[in-house]
Structure formats: C-alpha cells, structure tokens
Amino acid sequence: MKKALKLGLSAISFASLLALAACGGGGGGDGAPAGTPATTPPPAPTPTITVQGSAPTVSADPLAVVFVPQTETSTRSVLQSIASNAFPAQFQKAPNDGAYTQLGIDANSLITLNGGTVADVAGNGEFAIGRWTNGSNSIGSISANQGAHYAVGKPLALQRVLGPSQTLACTILASTSPTAVSGNFTPGKVNSASAVIDLNGPGLTTISLDVAIGSDSHATATVSGTTLNGVTQSSGVLHHVQTMGSSQSAPLLAFGYAMPTPTSGDVTGVVILKCQ
C-alpha cells in the first residue's frame, strides 16, 4: 500500500514538473526574473535654441508685438499674423534677454519656438527684434532659409496733432534679414526703408522698402495711406504696423511685411524706424 502511494505521488510530481516547464516556470527560463524593474527609455533630448545677436529685454506691460509667421504671404494673412499693443507681458518669454522664444495674447494662443535659432537679435530696451529660423515653432518647421520675424516693444499710441505740417519723417534703425517664403534663397538684407507719419490722423502717409535677396538686388515696395496699427493688405503688400517707444515726438515705427519680388517670390521681414 505504501509503495502504491509513493508511486502515485511520483506520477503527480512528474506531471507538475511538465506543466511548470510548459508555462516557462522554474529557473533557467528566458523571461526576466520576478521583481526586475522594467527598463525605462531615456527621455528625448530637449531641443536647443541658439541666439545670434543681443538686446535688452523690453520692460512694459502690456507689450506691443508684431509677428510675421513663416506661412504668411503678400496676399494672405494667417491666424498668427499679429500687430497689437495689448499683449500681456507674462506670455512674452525671452530667456536670453531680447531673444524672444514665446509670444501670445493669452494662454490658449501661444506661439512658441520649439528649437532652432533666434537670429538678427537687436534692440535698445524700447524694442527688440529677431528672426526664428532653422528649426520649428508651434506653427510648423522653418528651414535655414526661412524666417518667422518678430518685433516686441513698449506700446505707444500717438496723439492727434492738428496742423498743415504736423508730420514725422522716419528713418531705418534696425531690421531682420528678409527671407523668401519658399525657402529657395538665402536670407537677404534691407537696403533702405523710410516712412512719413501724418499726426493729423494720426496715420501712416507712406512707407517705402528696398530689399536685396536672391538675384533681386533692389526689390521695392511702397505702401501709402494706411493705418498706424494693425495688419492690413494694400498696395500689393501685407503689412503689420505698430507704433512703439516712450516719446510722442520721437516714436518708433515697427513695420512687418510680406511683399512680392520680381524673381524671389514673396519675401517677409521686420523693420524698425525712428520718427521725428
């Protein structure tokens, strides 16, 4: 009887071993030992942002903002085409002084540089300009030949002054390098820019641009009789206009543009003019 019981237990033990082996149990299996923590993949590297140029941070609240996105054309503005003097300072981020990497009117409409270069950075505390390039922002990718251009400054609403000769003449103070919307040409330069403000309005009587890019050594555009603040399309140019600074007698004029050129297609950029 004991012998039969011993044989029965042996048979049961042998069957259990077979079942355990079929399930991968027991030592020597291919699976990880019990209690071994799962391997966590390393975090993705943080996109880097390089800065070319320098400018002091603009101290004001709210801030005046002009933004010319890389998707804008001379005939079509987009959601991110901006010219405003009411942007809360808390949403305008410049980790490297005047090199702004985030712009927005509120938390739900932020435009952010995710990685790349902030080129052409310049300013004097009254304004700061720059060009996002060779990376991507919340709108999309930007090649090394493209640009999203900005100007940030102290907002200034010009007061109306009546009189037959109440005008201000404006000359160029700073600019970003003009970029072709197509990305087919290396960034160019602004040859000249000038404007006249009529304080009777006040309004922008005229502004003229001369830029060089690609084989266009002197591509010109002139806009006449337009508003001093806002985004408007006239004279074949989509333009962003905003007055900035702290002096009624010597204001700054920020002018963002998307203009056609003879052979380089639509070209965008920002200029700052000093008026007096």
Image (cartoon, rainbow, N blue to C red):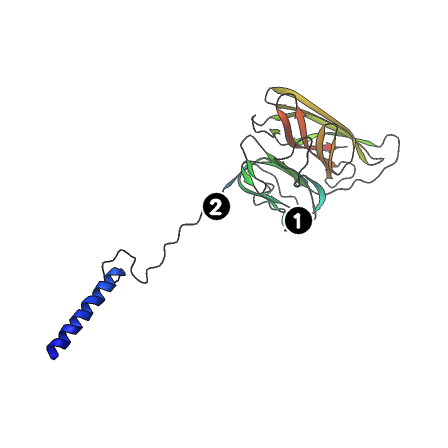
Residue 209 image position (x, y, % from top left): 70, 26
Which residue bears the numbered disc 2?
46
* Quarter-of-image position of residue 132: top right
Q: Tag 2: residue type?
A: Thr
- The quadrant where residue 234 appears: top right
> Which quarter of the rendering shows the N terminus?
bottom left
Image height check: is 132 above or below 3?
above
Image position of 165 (left or right of 220): right
Residues packed near mark 1 inside 10 Å, few (<14), some (14 to 19) or many (20 plus): some
So how many labels did they put on this image?
2
Residue drawn at 16 percent across, 71 percent down: 10
| Pick the front one: 26 or 152 | 26
Please tell me which residue lies in front, 222 or 72: 72
Q: In the image, what residue type sits under mark 1?
A: Ala
Please, what secondary structure does the residue beneath circle 2 have?
loop
Q: Position of residue 40 (x, y in %)?
A: 39, 53
Q: Earlier in the sequence, mark 2 or mark 1?
A: 2
Q: Secondary structure at mark 1?
A: helix
Q: Residue at left 66%, top 49%? A: 89
Residue 192 occupies which quadrant of the picture? top right
Q: Position of residue 127 (x, y in %)?
A: 67, 39
Q: Please say if 91 is above or below 265.
A: below
Q: In this view of the protein, can residue 15 be seen by the observer? A: yes
Label 2 and label 1: CA atoms lie apart by 25 Å
Query: Where residue 148 is drawn, which disc sits there?
Result: none
Foreground mark, 2 or 1, reads 2
* Residue wearing tag 1: 89
Q: Residues within 10 Å of mark 2 (few under 14, many from 20)?
A: few
Q: Is residue 94 left or right of residue 169?
A: left
Q: Nearer the viewer, residue 268 or 101?
A: 268
